[in-house]
Amino acid sequence: MDGIVDHTMIRVSDLEESLEWYQTHLDYEEKDRHEGEDFTLVYLGPEDMHDDAALLELTHNHGTDEVEIGDAWGHIAVRVPEGELEAYYEQLMDEGVADYRDPESCGGHYAFVKDPDGHEVEIVQRSPDEGALWSIDHTMIRVEDADDALGFWTRKFEYDEVGRWEADSFANYFLEPRNAADEAMAVELTYNYDGRSYTQGDGWGHLCVRVDDLQDDWDKLQTREADDYREPADCDHLYAFTRDQDGHEIELLERDPAADSLFPF
């Protein structure tokens, strides 16, 4: 069981404002939309995104005027070509995006902006063969125990640790499915050494792992003692959800590439 990350879901307070922000500044296009009784889901991504690249899912609960950004939720990171970080950051500034953390303040290696709800978007440099412009490079979440978190992803989902960076007060660990394409999204775990705890908030939604066989892969997770949060039968056998040791939700989704809709409904 080593499926790629299919999408990252975040909640937004004003769907049209968020759609305009991502479509204007990151050149995302709407890939699909589902209108529920009291919510709307929209998949977004670059026009020429790779089949193994991750989508961004925006969820808007109708009647919601504000979302809470908890500190367990970190950010998504999007790609720009190597050597062009400053140029693309200045482009965002010229378009009216708020100046949050510019390249100079980040040692020239990356930068950060925020979307209308305060979701952080990191800008990282990658070679052209590692994914389309503005495609999602990784999603970062904070964890309270690095050993438990690494064990969760390596044992239950069969992900490999592909990189780490250890500083004086924190460490970052990057995990990917085995033999993942260059365009696939990584999961970044951030562990702070001071023993702090985190709040989830409702602005952070979930990660979704694309699986080959929903029931079979769910059964494997249960054998590996994953949290039985929302089993396939509870979700009309369309998807399922487990949770990691910190309460981060992970959806399992069996996607049919030939289907008319990206959603399983």
Image: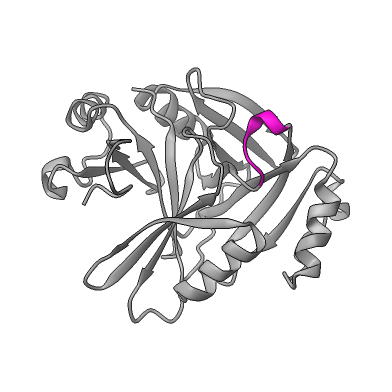
Vertical order, 79 against 113 (above or below):
above
Which residue: 29% across, 50% down? Answer: 263
What segment is highlighted magenta in the picture? 128-133
**What residue is at 17 percent from the left and 42 percent from the top?**
231
Residue 191 is one of the magenta-drawn residues: no
Q: On the image, which quarter does residue 161 sit in?
A: top right
Question: How far across and down, in percent of the image, does residue 151 sit?
Answer: 43, 27
Q: Position of residue 243 (x, y in %)?
A: 33, 43
Q: Quadrant of residue 162?
A: top right
* Residue 90 point in image, percent of width and height: 83, 60
Q: Quadrant of the N terminus?
A: top left
Relative placement, left or right, of 91 versus 198 is right
Q: Position of residue 212 (x, y in %)?
A: 28, 27
User: Where is 127 relative to 229, above or below?
Assistant: above
On screen, residue 21 versus residue 251, left or right, reads right
Work out which residue is located at the far top of the displayed protein and give it.
Answer: 179
Q: Taking the image as drawn, is residue 89 in sight?
A: yes
